[in-house]
Image (cartoon, coloured by chain):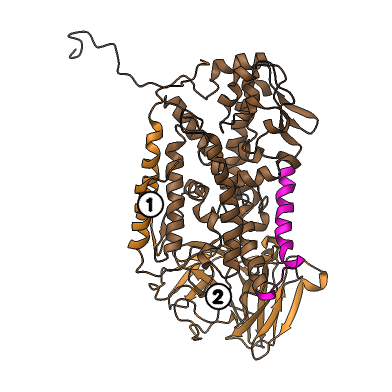
Amino acid sequence: MKPHPLLIAVIALGAHAQSHDHGPARPAPGGQAAAPSAAPSAGRPGAVREWTRQPLLLAGRGARGERTAAMLRPQGIAAATVTVFAAEGPESRLKVEYPVTADGAKIEAAAPKTGNYHWVTAREESDVEVRTASTAWYFGNPGPSPKDLLKRPRHELEIVPDPLPREHASYRESEKWRFLVRWNGQALAGQTIQLETEFGSRGSFLTDAAGFATVLFPRDFKPSEAPADGGHGPRRAAFVLSTLKEAEGRRYLTAFNYNYGQDGDRDKSLGWGAAFGLVGMIAAAPLLRRRKTGDNTHA
Amino acid sequence: MLKSIFPTLARFRLAVQILMLFVTVYGSVIVGNYMADKISSALPALSCAYDQANGGYCVLVPTQHIIHHRIGEAMVRAQQLTTQMVLPLLMTFVSFFAFFFVLGKMFCGWVCPLGTLQELVGKIGRRFGIGLRRVESGDLGDVKRVRPVKWLLLLGLVFVLPLLTGLGVTPHTLGNPYCDICPSRIATTLLTGNTEQLALRLGDNVSFTLGAIANLLIGFTVIGALAVRQPFCRICPLLALNSVFQRLSPMRLSKPAMHESCAKCGICTEACPMDIPEIARQSGRKAYHEDCTLCGRCAEYCPQDGIIKLKWGPFALFSSSRDYYKDKVKRELPDGTVKPLKFVRNAAKPAAGTADA
């Protein structure tokens, strides 16, 4: 069947009509998930600035693109080591401590072929305060589900995603996600957690009776001025969730930081999409005309 | 008991299709949220990875991804191709084949969500009396003219363009071009209430154009399927990929010999949703054609005992029979025609004077 001239014209017109705006590429299911980054990715590459006083674990330079290693830099926490927990692998690799150097800590997957999410934490402790930073790092190779990894308590006070975004997906602005707050491994009800984003948004959320807080990610991405930082996927920015508890004369502060992406509908046109779908339907409409000859004779 | 629930092979297949439509579109509620929890990331069916609630991924996703990110980029870095670079692709095909070995091309005819949706739309068309159009000489044209398209899509969009992108020849937005034009991506995400994939990316001409093609295809498929059976399956690159391996699965269509009436009959071709003439005209290997989706309709509508069979290895799972055929055509004609629904005005007008009573 020859392509209908009208279809070609509409494609050409549509492609030409939207050439003024340079948005990011569509998130691809095959793309590597981004990790929390020290360098804001939303049109301001290179500039590292402190947007929160909470303890963070941020991706250092040169970390992206490596499949079995990554550089993480603690910020807002004086930690000598970074600890990586894996869901699967040799016994000696299920929990590994990496020293923090001037560039950060170079962490590795539990095994060369074991990817997927790893849980990463850093801890600073004194007589009066315990500060913990945590994040998840996704290594590009396939690996076990992080369900069990997230269930195991690592510190006294923790904020744990429930669930983490599916691999190759992400948290996104305007979406609601659940986070569990645990105290000594038990769900902590009525606890306030604070949200801060790289763009300056602030919010607080209260855990329910089961210890879950439902966090609404603010719609705070600015219109894009530059294309995404290479590769697939939407623009991303960092956020941190933190909570504080005092017990037995000590102050416990824990934080979970990760990235969230811009709303998938940004820089997209549902109208154009529907229009092309409609053109496809119109192109198929002549098929609905009845055949004049050759009707079925097996009735 | 089972026979009263599934009186025909077609009814049984429809039940399997509906179940698999649920699994491939909403299956995460059963298998779990994470990719590692999925049934597989190399299913021989168009189970879309853009659908955040599905139960498994289509094999074309990792194929494009690995060719783009592993092989193409590695070739640029290392200037050579090593086993380690192609190992992930081999593992993907091993996973794919582990499933394919069991069901063969039944993944097309029994599992694929887009195939099921097209068939359901076709049933609506038949039910509402929309005339069936055939891809054959004398109607829409010789089916052989359409057949190369699926191979071109497989070669060009699943293998060549991702490789060229990995090599840096083509832009990054051409890294997974088949997914970008796949109508199953639109259909299955819409079924989860997500319109994001229907919307077109602005600001990038390549993404916009690929997305527009996908939308044209799904629009064409939705309306076209009312009159033409399985319009997209005919050009689907996954059908081409599955047909590469179809002889390696014990699941197959078997027609070892021609019946004396085969040359004049042709009901099996009429029943075939892919309009495959070879099933009527050929026997042996040629009867199990590359376009076959193992739906089994040819066997259901063959009026001769034991001529066409669905077999798994030496076991005949279904065999044609005259009695079955006679019963089957009472319910539905070979081309899928059933008693159409007709909307008529109430013929019995109220008697004079009663309307105001």
Magenta span covers which residues?
A: B77-101
Q: Would you say residue A50 sits in the magenta stretch? A: no
User: Which chain shows up in brown?
Assistant: B
Query: Considering the numbered disc 2 on the image, is that residue within a helix, a strand or a loop?
Result: strand
Farthest residue to the bottom: give it: A102
Rendered location of residue A54, percent (x, y): 54, 82
**What residue sits right under mark 2 in the picture?**
A243
Check residue A8 in the rendering and tell me which mark sits there, or answer none: 1
Q: Amino acid at mark 2?
A: Thr
User: Which chain shows up in orange?
Assistant: A
Rendered location of residue B58, percent (x, y): 62, 51
Going from the N terminus, do you reach mark 1 or mark 2 first? Answer: 1
Check residue B40 in the rendering and tell me which mark sits there, or answer none: none
Which chain is mark 1 on?
Answer: A
In-image side of A293 versus B299 (left or right): left
Near-viewer residue (A232 or A120) = A232
* Whether residue B236 is visible: no
In-image side of B299 versus B143 (left or right): right
Q: Would you say residue B81 sits in the magenta stretch? A: yes
Where A101 falls versus B194 (above or below)? Answer: below
